[in-house]
Amino acid sequence: MAPRRFGDAVVYQVYPRSFQDSDGDGVGDLGGILARLDHLTWLGVDALWLSPIHPSPNADWGYDIADYDGIAADLGTFEDFDRLVEGCRARGLRLLLDLVPSHTSIAHPWFREHPERYCWHDGPAPPNNWRATFGGPAWSRDPVNGRWYLHSYYPEQPDLDWSRPDVVDAMQAVIRRWRERGADGFRIDACTRIAKDPERRDDPPRTTPSPFNWHPEYGALEHVHSKDGPGIGAALAAVRDAAGDAPLVAEATLPNEQLGRYLEHVDACFAFELQAAAWTAPALNHALGRALALEDGLAWVLGNHDVPRLASRVGPERAAAAAVLLLTLPGPVFVYQGDELGLADGPAPAQPLDRAGRDGARTGIPWQAGAAHAGFTTGEPWLPVAEPPTWAGGTAAEQRSDATSHAALHRDLIALRRELSGPATAVGLGPDTVAFARGDTVVAIRPDGGPVAAPEGELLLRTARGDGIVVRRA
Ligand code: NOJ
């Protein structure tokens, strides 16, 4: 078992295109991130993770990479990256990059120059029934050579064949180069897709409900062959070998009991069962109970660029209790940009940009009231910046000067978190409440927004509605 390198770190997820634009082209960039690092130090986070920063045709907004060694022109230059690394170091922030090892963009030169690095099938029809994650078949015919290629996501994202040593070598070299350039660690994208059934057998129809909210077509199958294949351990061992002692967190959307093979090599796997749970006490208690039964290795996350924003999902008035739950659990915690402001989903643009409907969770951050596009850009934003009441709690600037704001609650929780230690054990405070103890401290929330019946003791923190509390027992 690897040592858990994240400890109890709080990691802030930056979606670079939507964080802060520094050059007026309407797209957030590395210079913008550097300019806003003070927001992260004000919150008190330990690290930031950048969604992919590499050249990409943006069929999947950066997750279709055309050059692992480059930086997308609209996001900045290597000098900007170096300055960001320096800025992070000066502030004691660790910088994590997004490693996308399972697929490239179809525009990556390898697809034509090294087609053998991908997963192909020759024949009149695809070899199996595998579906792509966002719907449709997982096999497409290459119009150039007429062969079928595998893509676990969009057809513009062909899957690499990790059983090939040259693929492993190439990806290890990528990891080493970014480590040398200043990356402190990585979030590993679509980790389960690195390895599939070598016999390419059909996925059977689903018979047991999945804990995850899949696209209906994809979720109709049990993904026993199209992902999480026998080669996963070797692939992750190679990633670990190249990454050295850098902290690694895996995006492995699997039931908790299947994460063991991943946790042999990475420090943490996102706790997606909890993220996907309905916002009710029974559902959360069930998911939390299952998660806490694992000894360690889960990274807590409630929001990211793939799902509706937390405030939209649970309701803006319940986001405070969600923050209490998220930021008091033991082990690493990931906070998606804007969730600390209680930002809700932005309006869908007239012409959707993301084919999987994720634009609303990716609109620009409102930094400053009265400024054009709330200070996100002086140009035309690539996605329209939301207006109030999407951010009823105010812009970042307003919230930072208001001790009762959602951002201040985050800062207070992150500070309080430093005083918590030890594992979490479930505490029964009634059927409407989700509660656990860490040492002599009890955390309790009411997902329905009602007031928690607080146990006796010193009240360390309470949400304005009383639906989230932290108490040191008498
Ligand atoms: C997971 C990423 O978070 C998501 O945005 C992307 O579409 C897929 N992996 C494919 O890379």
Image (cartoon, rainbow, N blue to C red):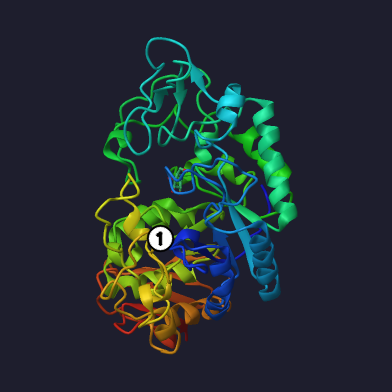
Going by the image, does 452 lie left or right of 186?
left
Identify the residue shown where x is 63% and y is 62%: 95
Q: Is residue 110 above or below residue 174?
A: above
Q: Is residue 167 above or below residue 291?
A: above
Going by the image, does 345 lie left or right of 254?
left
Identify the residue shown where x is 35% and y is 46%: 212
Q: Is residue 185 above or below residue 103?
A: below
Percent coordinates x, y for residue 7 in the rendering = 62, 63
- Farthest-out residue, top: 123
Viewer can see residue 243: no
Percent coordinates x, y for residue 57 in the rendering = 47, 43
Quick one: 269 or 60, which is closer to the camera? 60
Q: Is the CB of mark 1 within 8 Å of ligand 1?
A: no
Rate crowding at label 1 as few (under 14), some (14 to 19) or many (20 or more) other CA atoms within 10 Å: many
Q: Amino acid at mark 1?
A: Gly
Percent coordinates x, y for residue 136 in the rendering = 32, 31
Viewer can see residue 356: yes
The answer to which quarter of the image holds residue 4 is bottom right
Q: What residue is pinned by disc 1?
A: 303
- Check disc 1 and report its element: helix, strand or loop: loop
Quick one: 337 or 275, which is closer to the camera? 337
Quick one: 427 or 404, which is closer to the camera? 404
Identify the residue shown where x is 57% and y is 63%: 30
